[in-house]
Amino acid sequence: MSAEAPLLLMRGIVKQFPGVRALDGVDLEVRRGEVHCLLGQNGAGKSTLIKILAGAHQPDEGVIAFDGREVRLTSPTAAIRQGISTIYQELDLVDGLSVAENVFLGHERARFGFVRSGEDNRATRELLARLGHPEIRPSTEVGRLSPAAKQVVSMARALSHDTRLIIMDEPSAALAHDEVANLFRIVRELTAQGVAVVYISHRLEEIREIGDRVTVLKDGRAAAVGLPAKSTATSEIVSLMTGRNVEYVFPPRRERPGSGPEVLRVEGLTVPGVFADVSFTVGAGEIVGLAGLVGSGRSEIIEAVYGARRASGTVTLEGRPVRRGGAAATVKLGMGLAPEERKAQALLLDQSVAANITLAGLDGYSRFGWIDRRRESARARDLIETLDIRPGDPERPIRTLSGGNQQKAVLARWLVGTRRLLLLDEPTRGVDVGARAELYAVIRRLADEGIGVLLVSSEVPEVLGLADRVLVIREGRIIHRSDARDLDEHQVLDMIMEGSAL
Amino acid sequence: MTDSRGPQAEKAPPADEHVRVEAQARKPAARTGPLARFGEARHLGLLVALALLVVVGLVTRPENFATTSNLVSVLSLAATIGVITVGMTFVIIGGGIDLSVGAIMALASVWATTLATQSYGPFVMILCAVLVGTGAGLVNGLLISYGRVVPFIATLAMLVAARGLAQRMSDRKTQLVQQGNETIVELSTTRVLGLPLLVYIFALVVLAGWILLNRTTFGRRTYAVGGNPEAARLAGIDVRRHTLLLYALSGLCCGIAAVLIMARTTTGSSTHGDLYELDAIAAVIIGGTLLTGGRGTIIGSILGLMIFTLITNLFILNGLNTSDQLIAKGLIIVVAVLLQRRGLESRT
């Protein structure tokens, strides 16, 4: 092998999940000492690819060569042993342990089982100094550090192994501006020492600043491999990312007879440091889509509208002010939320489909707290039939349903009782393509019945195809609003990634 | 709807038609009735264990086991902890734990048997016990839901403090139920169909608990709050208020248990109910309720309690060492939980 051989070479990587071909023959080549950027829309396969590199997933097909030799990364430990470290978006540090204990977690220097903490501390101090952060003390408890400092600790941990390739998954998402500058300084020092970095970010300006080459993923394939990061035109990169091959089937929009009466009015909604001065309205029967990156503030806006997050500004539902700080009151007013994390935030996994459907509307089926079980189960059956939830057995535990059918049950929950406004946060996450079309049809039908819908999605085509009007969010502000039919995917991606106005 | 049945068909509004069609369609496969649920697989193991214990009793002590007096003593013993177990089941399904039940019961029994309280007669004594129990439960609930103290710690503090208060009020003396207030004692001496009244009170509490858990919005929300508090909150349930009510309910059960123990022992004492919390928690766990919340049944808890009580009874009848009895109970808890884990795994 010549010295010019790439550090990492992936060829024809295929990874199949039930119902999805996440990777369909991806190639990736990373050289020593370079910052290689990975770009692609949600669902393009980025996270699957880095999980394979980290040893968390096994590819079904394909070859991985590291340092000129073919390797099999059968577990995270195997990947680390090769010299591949991953810094995940959700930092995986233990808050209650010290900096040094975190850095050497799992590979403490020990003699006869006794941790030699002095040595760990000394080694940690060296690593932190190498990262340009001698001020972080190895004995400090990690829980007391800022997000930026935690990131540095994560990197120290990566370097504590003999690391030659570091994967960074959106490292800047949690960082303020000057902290990003420091991150870049560290990345440059690492690469100067010959360490290679795979850098994942949605922010094009970062990629231009720090990146050497870019690989663009689309539909589980590499749309382009190793483009020069500094000189490739934005429009070229965005074109490579767009036009995904997924068959999205959207229900037809109703020709709007002027928008219906206003349901939701949001004025000057602000959560300091997250989003500012957000104002918009949603009409009856209208679907309004929020397009923006993760971290742009879109989910937080939804939570604030729902009253589950404190914010300044006013929210009114059909003219009545929404009290903030209590979802219970908001639900009574006629709002419903299908939250982003279906399992963690919406479902009672141990309970039946029927119990999940009627959870928010129990008062409508009870008198003095006594549940009228016949009416309850009849209504649940009705909704199961209307939304075509399968299998159609209301007594079945909801955990046995597919993601799409679980999501339908969450929607059904908000159809018992009178709903004026539905807030949908990533309604099709983890739902396979066929079931998506059904969900879209359901959402459109609800709107046609007069409910206002506020939709958040990471998938630009989804927002454009489903919504009537689109608000583009970037860094906590609405930077563009227009009719969905006046925008295309390219334009929206351009705006949310580079902040260019139309 | 060809075979519509008279009275029902008349009053049925159109919307209800659907219900009946479905109900009939399901009838052959109906497995959701209370009886069916009682015999559901998860309770089957408990029933088998209980039956085994009965067989052991019949074989080892044929002359004393199957007697009315033994039955009465087993049920009376079970009644006090049983009432507490009902409250504990709610708290644990709701994702919490209540360590203070025994101490609250002791405090309620002491408060109700002070001379001052006794001077108002038996009904005020009962009211006093129930109110003291509920009040202590409310304090637990307030600390946990609005004070955001971890349930384990809040109720541990209550355990210590309530017992201390009971000692202070009674001056560590056992307080007898005075003459003129024997109505309370009659709960244990008066028999209907051969069983003392307090057994019927126990049965009523179990029935009320079952209905509350399975037929009301309160019960449904208890599962929701314990199973996924975030989902419950976002579905518009006031999780904090519900948590508060759960601990108040547990306190109320302690108050009722205090009345039963006063009836049984004719005393109020700060030493009543020592380690009842452990028996109650063990019964709930043996009964298949998840300590993490969101899943469980009243019937399971009561079966678990009966298993525990029968073991005690069998050891006493056979004149065995009480230390061995504790060892046996410990083993039962572990075996029950291991079996349930296997049951869960085979289901998924």
Image: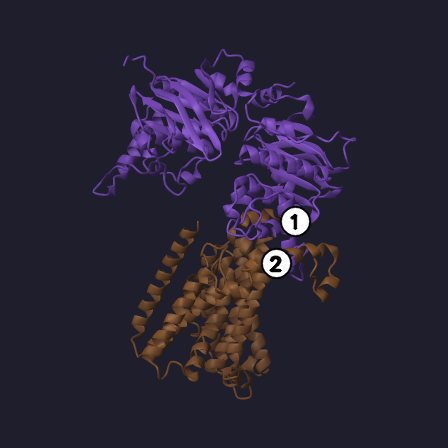
The correct choice, above or below, for A499 with respect to B161 in the image is above
**Would you name the residue on which mark 2 appears?**
B217
Which of the two marks, 1 or 2, is nearer to us in this view? 1
Task: Check whether the beta carbons of the residues at disc 1 and disc 2 lie within 8 A of each other.
Answer: no
Q: Residue at x 73, y 31 (%)?
A: A254
Discs 1 and 2 share one subunit: no
The correct choice, above or below, for B325 with respect to B347 in the image is below
- The local secondary structure at tag 1 comes to helix
Q: Dot 2, how many residues are within 10 Å of its Cα: few (below 14), some (14-19), or many (20+)?
A: many
Q: Position of residue B43 (x, y in %)?
A: 45, 63
Chain letter, disc 1 residue: A
Left/right placement of residue B183 relative to residue A17 reads: right
Furthest residue toward left: A112
Furthest residue toward top: A231
CA distance for labels 1 and 2: 20 Å
Quadrant of the image occupied by residue B132: bottom right
Chain letter, disc 2 residue: B
Q: Amino acid at mark 2?
A: Thr
Q: Nearer the viewer, residue B147 or A19?
A: A19
- Image quadrant containing the N terminus of chain B: bottom right
Q: Amino acid at mark 1?
A: Asp
> Which chain is the one coloured purple?
A
Q: Position of residue B73 (x, y in %)?
A: 43, 80
> Which chain is the one coloured brown?
B
Q: Position of residue A215 (x, y in %)?
A: 45, 19
